Amino acid sequence: MSKIKLSALDTRAPKDLDKTATKEKTASYLEELDELQNLLFAEGKHSILVVIQGMDGSGKDGVIRNVLGNMNPQGVAVQSYKAPTEKELSHDFLWRIHQHTPARGMIQVFNRSHYEDILVTRVHKWCDDETARKRMDAINDFEKLLQQHNNTHILKFYLHVSPEEQHERLSERMKDPAKMWKYNEKDFAEAKLWDEYMEMYEECFEKCNQPEWIIVPADQNWYKEYVIAKALRDLMKELNMQFPGLKK
Amino acid sequence: MSKIKLSALDTRAPKDLDKTATKEKTASYLEELDELQNLLFAEGKHSILVVIQGMDGSGKDGVIRNVLGNMNPQGVAVQSYKAPTEKELSHDFLWRIHQHTPARGMIQVFNRSHYEDILVTRVHKWCDDETARKRMDAINDFEKLLQQHNNTHILKFYLHVSPEEQHERLSERMKDPAKMWKYNEKDFAEAKLWDEYMEMYEECFEKCNQPEWIIVPADQNWYKEYVIAKALRDLMKELNMQFPGLKK
């Protein structure tokens, strides 16, 4: 994979795409996903890990609610990773991650993830380049472990918003009473580090690419949800799962 | 490291070794260990993982009680790995292991370990050779993670008993009321698979050798305890730990 340049990639849907038709497709994928998740659970052979990364305001919560939250919650778990606790910091950086990897039959969603340990930490220089490279190697080994030893299929999504769209969304949080709880004045300070974040994301896409990242144009929620629903549905379709029949 | 041939290695102390003098040395190491463990805990920079493997009757429990149990239990944790539960089996084989790796400042003892997944499982053909090799790679990656990302120093001990000594100890379990609870008729069936176990152990010592295994002659408890106390003490001495002084 050649190095991705994020600033060269669209943050919006292709211009000629029909919004209504696309939303209808998304709805039909969501119906399929509900059935496929049931089959995944029943068969119990595979597991799925969905990693969702993106800048503040890129719409991670919305994707979780509208796409992944559409399936039976008994078979779908969401883990949000915030700043590590003191206890978590006294272990290797993957310790808190490994605890929440999916059992066979399950879909596990990570709202932020182990990738923060090579993103926010690098932007703020809490982690030097050499450590970051070792962490990337460790992440690759770790993802290989999950793939090879627990039939875990990994989908890594980067929600790609434009800085303009991000600014608008963060500003909304100051005005809309239903969004005020998400407002954090630090988000604006982080937003100023945009170029540094993009650089770290680009290196991460290049180095941790088994499987490759899916860059999701995320300025429009309807298109973002379509891309993610489709990717998950396509992956699950390919597993050729079967109901196991009566237990012997 | 050239391949170890277990049958060529002593299971007893060197013939000219003075038992009384050795026991005195062990006692002084145990005193040092108590202090070193306190320092490890206070400094909070390093962590230690002690893996104890060996055939039934090789004296794993005794080592844990007499050597590792000698230190402050607040800073030493023991995790015994038995046959995996259904929940554990629905995850990759290192999932249940990673949960119990040591926090910085701690000594963690594994009574049996992730190595069972390439030992008992192979002897009984529950795990084919290709899977076993992938597991060995995964184990090496995993131990590297702990070493590089949490200052974890790993000591891997194989308690090397002779089949004759093993037979005597297993037979004792049928006669001594204080040992009867350990008796399991299956142990004798396992003992018949001696050669297969030795072969699997030898491959494991060769392939998973970062750090190298310490083969402990284990027919005599006094010598086994000496070797283990010394190895742990030597390792901890080398860390050049310092009390951190007053917190700022």
Image (spheres, coloured by chain):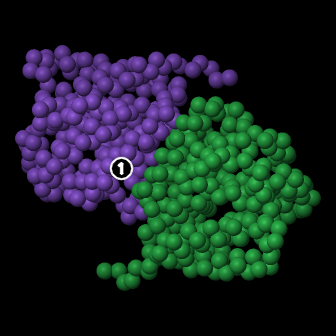
Chain colours: A purple, B green
Quick check: A104 above or below B246?
Answer: above
Q: Would residue B125 be found to the left or right of residue A192 on screen? A: right
- Secondary element at image label 1: helix
Q: Position of residue B22 (x, y in %)?
A: 75, 76
What residue is drawn where x is 41% and y is 50%? A94
Residue B244 picture quarter: bottom left
Q: Residues within 10 Å of mark 1 (few under 14, many from 20)?
A: many
* Of residues B224 and A142, the one drawn nearer to the viewer in this rendering: B224
Q: Position of residue B39 (x, y in %)?
A: 50, 77
Q: Position of residue B97 (x, y in %)?
A: 55, 50
Look at the image and tell me whether residue B85 can be seen: no
Furthest-bottom residue in this view? B246
Quick check: A90 above or below B4?
Answer: below
What residue is drawn where x is 38% and y is 64%? A86
- Amino acid residing under circle 1: Arg
Quadrant where the N terminus of chain A is found in the figure: top left
The chain under label 1 reads A
Quick check: B126 above or below B147?
Answer: above
The residue identified by callout 1 is A135
